[in-house]
Amino acid sequence: MKEKTTAIVLAAGQGKRMHSKIQKQFLEIQGHPVLYYSLKCFQESPLIHDIIIVTGEDMISYCKREIVERYQLTKVSAVIAGGKERYDSVYKGLLACEECKYVFIHDGARPFITEEILERGMFGVQETGACVVGMPSKDTVKVADEADFVSETPDRKRVWTVQTPQIFSYDLIKKAHESIRKKDMTAITDDAMVVEQESGVQVRLVEGSYQNIKITTPEDLDVAEVFLKKIEKM
């Protein structure tokens, strides 16, 4: 592939719901940090040319020593400090990219991405310039009003739970972030919203995996152990 593709992996989250002194992305699953597993996938993928890790300023040395060097992640071109909010960390990651055509933005607390997911994401971004990984919701979803009464029940066939990576043309996502930073960003929860609001480009949903969970609570670690044992048997 001629066009350069960069993976920005976000590893600056505090993980308050984990109730642990260790940040969730550095907790271990079967002897390896959660962050390691997605980095390994990007390292081994022929679609990805380099990786930028965005972490807390106090964790930069740890990431370089205990993750990048320990696991010989040769595609990691930079380990940089993130910002106060997720969108600040993404923006810093975008500024650290060098001459890339596409960018995969991924939460380091999602360890179970696969090459198949990356391939579907690449196909989607090449067609549309913007796509996000997700899965159709298994549950009926209710929209609540301000008093917590049901105000709407959307058709479950049209409801997806969004995951990462979220994949964009680099120029598109960088311009969208630069534009929205001049406005109120308190309601922004993912990069697709930035593109939707600032560019008018439609974001395509592409299939991820129900195993592509985000490690957020202690229960998620238990589920991750089960998934990993299943994967290792395949």
Image (cartoon, rainbow, N blue to C red):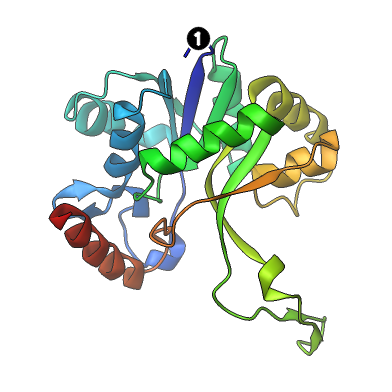
The spot of residue 106 in percent (x, y) is 49, 40
In this view, 168 is above or below 230: above
Considering every residue shown, the one lying at the far bottom of the view is 149
- Mark 1: amino acid: Lys
Q: Residue at x 45, y 43 (%)?
A: 117
Q: Residue at x 50, y 9 (%)?
A: 2
- Compare residues 171 and 135 and report the one nearer the observer: 135
Left or right placement of residue 62 versus residue 208 in this view: left
The spot of residue 18 in percent (x, y) is 38, 65
The spot of residue 172 in percent (x, y) is 73, 26
- Compare residues 216 and 134 and report the one nearer the observer: 134
The spot of residue 199 in percent (x, y) is 83, 34
CA neighbours of label 1 inside 10 A, class few (<14), some (14 to 19), many (20+)? few
**Could you say whether the residue bearing mark 1 is in a helix, strand or loop?**
loop
Q: Residue at x 79, y 43 (%)?
A: 196
Q: Quadrant of residue 59?
A: top left
Q: Residue at x 64, y 40 (%)?
A: 131
- Compare residues 182 and 71 and report the one nearer the observer: 71
Q: Quadrant of residue 202?
A: top right
Left or right placement of residue 90 versus residue 21 in this view: right
Screen quadrant of the C terminus: bottom left
Q: Is residue 85 visible?
A: no
Left or right placement of residue 3 versus residue 159 in this view: left
Q: Is residue 14 visible?
A: yes
- Residue under numbered circle 1: 2
